[in-house]
Image (tube, rainbow, N blue to C red):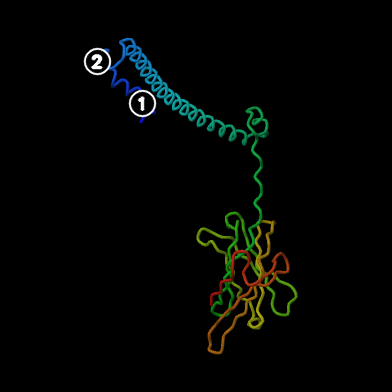
Amino acid sequence: MPVLPDKRLEQIQFFETRLPAWQAAPAAAIGLTTAQITALASATQNARDAFNAAQAARSASKGATTAYHTASDDMRELGADLIRTIKAFADLQASPGAVYGLAQIPEPLPPEPLGPPGKPVEFAVALETGGAITLSWSAPNASASSGAFFTVARKLPGEADFSFIGGTGGSTTESRRMSFTDATVPASAAAQGAQYRVRGQRGTVVGQFSDGITIEFGVDGAGRAGVTARATPSAEGGGGGGGGGGEGGPLRVAA
């Protein structure tokens, strides 16, 4: 088993603890000469002094690093305030670019226009009292505050094309889902079903149509109102219907 510890500081402490006893013992008692013990004592003191100097340097370095970070933070905060002042001043000038050029600050790029709302998905359908049909859905990038609007088109049995029947605004903090109630759907469409599709737009930029939805509704022999819905391929941008309500999952139906 090694006598000396592995760590440097522990080695210094090892000799500092034993040197007094070695110096006090008769030379012949432990087999060392006075010169050997004196040399070790000097080496141990040198090691201790070097350790203390290293500790002081580390502390000084930490203090210097803290001072450097504080100074650079102050500089950044003040500089950022001045840059904001330059930008505000440039915006009031007839030639903002000249101000930015003199200040050697890149001129802000014009904001990119928002794209259209995403494809409507996750449809739910409800049959209202009186026979009206209410559709609700969700869509990405569809907040009303950003100008999102959704148009609803319908195709009745026997009609060749979809026709615009109304629209609704985008989502709000009160309602993350959009909805539209079709109060003009005729009872004659109940058996074969009325088809709907929804598309978002923002200004003149239009988005992708939802998958088509066929809704059948009416009252059964027991006098119970009911509604069923199934996804159908859209004629424009709708893709395959399968058994779901688009990318967001299957249709949800509420009577």
**Distance from the alpha carbon under mark 1 to that under mark 2:** 21 Å
What quarter of the picture does the N terminus occupy?
A: top left
Quarter residue 117 falls in = bottom right
Mark 1 surroundings within 10 Å by alpha-carbon count, few (fewer than 14), some (14 through 19), many (20 or more): few
Does 185 appear above or below 239? below
Question: SS class of the residue under badge 2?
Answer: loop
Location of residue 50 (image quadrant): top left
User: Circle 1 sits on which residue?
Assistant: 4
Q: Amino acid at mark 1?
A: Leu
| Total tally of numbered discs in the picture | 2
Residue identified by numbered label 2 = 25
Going by the image, does 113 lie left or right of 36? Answer: right
Q: Of the residues under marks 1 and 2, which one precedes in the sequence?
A: 1
**Quick one: 219 or 212, which is closer to the camera?**
212
Q: Position of residue 19 (x, y in %)?
A: 29, 18
Question: Image height check: is 20 above or below 247?
Answer: above
User: On residue 65, which mark appears?
Assistant: none
